[in-house]
Image: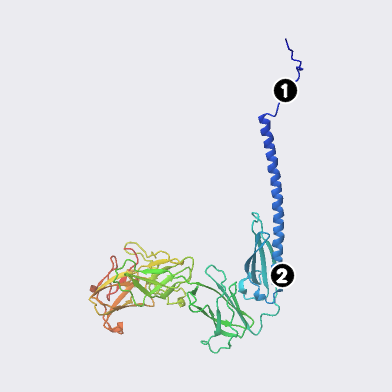
Amino acid sequence: MIRFNTRPRHETREQGFTLIEVLVAMMVFGLLSVLVAYLLTSAMTITRSNRSSEVAANLAAQAIDQARSSTDVFSVLSGVTTTTVDGTTYTVTRSAGWLTNAGTASDCGTSGLLQNKTLNVAVTWSGMSAGASPVQASTLLAPAGPINDPTTGTIIVHVRNAAGVGVAGIPIGIAVDSTITPNTATTVSPAPPATDVDGCSYVLKVVPGSYVVTIGATGDGRISGDQQQPLKLSVPVTAGQSSVLDKQYDTAATPKLTLAPGSPATTMFPTNLTVTYVPQGDAYTAQVTMTTSGGVTTTSTPLFPYSSGYQAFAGTSVPVGPAGGGAAICLSVDPAAWTIPNASGNVGVRSDPIIGVTAGSTGTVTMKLVTVTGISGRWLVAVSAAAAATVGDPGCATGMSMAFAKAATNSVTLALPYGSWKLYSLANKTDTVSTSPVVASTSITLPAGSPAFTAGNIFTLDPRAP
């Protein structure tokens, strides 16, 4: 039997979305989702930032209120504290200083003024937006009573480390300067307090006169910027004025230096050897203590830890200790002072590497070696001398003397600083060079390339390359 399809011809089968339509829909949905998520995140971030700013403002105001409520303006100090609120860590940084005439803050009142104190508080927090500024608050603090007395003076001490940061806990002493007469100074009691967190100590209402102020204590392992342990300063005090001491005092560096590296194990060094250290400031000459182990002679001198390090050379370039003031009065021991070219056209340079000031730092001090024969049982003393002008030695105006122990053998090797020398042979340790014979040039062997002996058996140890 024949069957006929009775479905209308215009009816079609139901169809779904095509793949392209699905992909487009998903992409649009994804973009909308990202936009909504971004807006929600931004709103939450702004809300959190606003809340953090409010907390920071409250913390800054709290720090200002605490400072204003203090009865002692000297107790308002710089410092950093942290606190956590609702999982966010806030850092409160206080910067205190005395107001100068120029309207700026001065640490410890080192401008000489102790009138009004400024305090700036800055608060930051974890998760701050990039480029966001800390919340800040400032105030001006006035002492409860007068600090300065027109009939007395003030001593202000500011102690800083090598980085220029104030050092806390440094003891300060003050005494009448007994070397000055007449002197109207009187004993100060009680003793000044140790430096506070800003490195400051104040001595108020001091009777005018001359005093000695001591910064630090013997054996504290620290040293001043001018190489004193502890630092002692003569300070005049004038009525109605402030005497300001702004000094560096830091943990001493103790680099280990090898003297005359590569020299024979039997080399003899001067018993009174000095070494001159050249930091970023004035040169400093120190009497050194030597140690010999395994045929190597070393020394270690406490030094202020200047970050630039030191150069060093044997001999006394300036008076021993800080009194030298950087005036090079014995030039011959400094290789850099040999500025006249020799026959080869060379001048002197400090060739030894820079000596560091960190823990475990080492260095070298180059010295010239001289062999002397025929002096068994004798004491040798080398005295700086003036060589002929043609030699090019810059000279040693103050003179220098290097003494050696008794020679145990007939031939010894001596280590000496640069310069021109005359060598004396003493029968007894207590003899003087004026009554002792000069060692003849025939008994002395100089380093290769040394200038020839000049009149009077004077020989020159030259730092210039031959």
Q: Position of residue 134 (x, y in %)?
A: 66, 60
In 3D space, how far apart are the residues under numbered discs 1 and 2 (Cα atoms)?
82 Å
Q: Position of residue 13 (x, y in %)?
A: 72, 22
Left or right: 199 with respect to 274?
right
At 61% across and 83% down in the image, what residue appears?
A: 238
Pick the quarter of the image with the C terminus. bottom left
435 w.r.t. 131: above or below: below
Point out which mark residue 105 bears: none
163 w.r.t. 6: above or below: below
Q: Position of residue 263 (x, y in %)?
A: 31, 68
Graded by Cα atoms within 10 Å as few (under 14), some (14 to 19) or many (20 or more), the crowding at tag 2 reads: few
Q: Amino acid at mark 1?
A: Arg
Q: Position of residue 36 (x, y in %)?
A: 71, 44
Q: Residue furthest front?
A: 1
Please tell me which of labels 1 and 2 falls first in the chain.
1
Residue 458 placement: quadrant = bottom left
**Closer to the observer: label 1 or label 2?**
1
Name the residue tied to disc 2.
Answer: 65
| Residue 59 visible to an observer of this rendering | yes
Name the residue tied to disc 1.
Answer: 13
- Closest to the observer: 395 or 17? 17
- Closest to the observer: 373 or 434? 373
